[in-house]
Amino acid sequence: MNVIGLIPARLESTRLPRKLLLRETGKPLIQHVYERVQQAQELSDVFVATDSEEIAKVIRDFGGKVVKTGPAASGTDRLAQACQTSECANFEGIINVQGDEPEIAVSTINALAKTLKAGLDSMVTVAVWEANQERIKEPSIVKLVLNSQGYALYFSRSLIPYFREASETGFYRHLGIYGYTRDFLLKYTRWEPTPLEQAEKLEQLRVLENGFRIKVLLVQDDHIGIDVQEDYDRFVKRFKMLASGVLAPETLAPEALTHKEGK
């Protein structure tokens, strides 16, 4: 199976406008993401999917590959559009990496691609164990529960499971990176939005509500996406510390650094 990395990218963002073009590191944010995804040996190619000519020009200027799409309701819909272009039509698997995650672990991308290549699952995602009780209460942090075979039972913005008698020690936290077979992605995006999906505002629930499975890989490598200005500022600080030799590459752990900074 030929698997590619697809990065859906839109110009405007509600909480941090035009964030993919921020370049306080000397490179636009989208270039950091593209170059990180390129490091994944299990991928045959990498493309950015966008309807923005401004983003497309930035990608071409640094030598990246871009697929132009029309306007899309979601990143998943944008991927489906990209899959039907001549550039991507011959690939059988897609790894969806968000355009605002420059520190996604390469090992995570490779693990998703290997799972697709095994041919047993049509959709796969990842999760980490979260022990921070305050952080996990945030609705922006998506929680999930699994069955004994490692498939998702449910995703929620609420605390799940509810521990009736024992005090909780932690939860599984979902990381928003996915792998799909091309055929399944095209099928999935044709389905109508479902009640639980609309209630939680979580697209992946559409898959479960239609009776399909999502394989979940448990990973150790955490990363922090760029959602607000403070996230970007911390990324720039980590990048500059790494570039100056203050940090060694193996110590570049965003969560650990965040705690050291007292955030």
Image (cartoon, grey):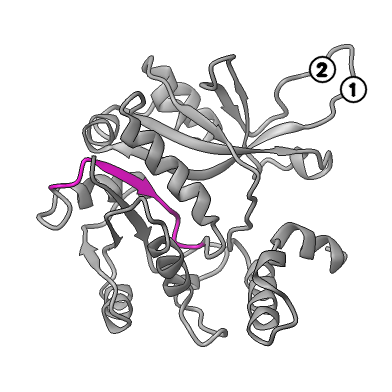
Mostly what secondary structure, the magenta segment?
A: loop
Asked which quadrant contains residue 252, the reply is bottom right
In front: 155, or 110? 110
Circle 1 residue? 167
Is 37 drawn above or below residue 120 in the view shown?
below
Q: Residues within 10 Å of mark 1 (few under 14, many from 20)?
A: few
The magenta segment is 90-100
Mark 2 burial class by Cα count in 10 Å: few <14, some 14-19, many 20+ = few
Label 1 to label 2, Cα distance in Å?
6 Å
Horizontal relation, residue 250 to residue 31: left or right? right
Q: Answer with the quarter of the image where residue 172 lies.
A: top right
Q: Which residue is mark 2?
A: 163
Q: Viewer-proximal residue, 209 or 95?
A: 95
Q: Residue at x 55, y 55 (%)?
A: 105
- Looking at the rendered structure, which numbered label has been put on residue 111? none
* Quarter of the image where the C terminus is located: bottom right
Disc 2 secondary structure class: loop
- Where residue 223 appears, as percent x and y from the top left, is 62, 55
| Residue visible at 39% across and 25% down in the picture | 207
Q: Which amino acid type is marked by label 2?
A: Phe
Residue 209 position in % (x across, y down): 42, 18
Residue 64 spot, x, y in % from top left: 29, 73
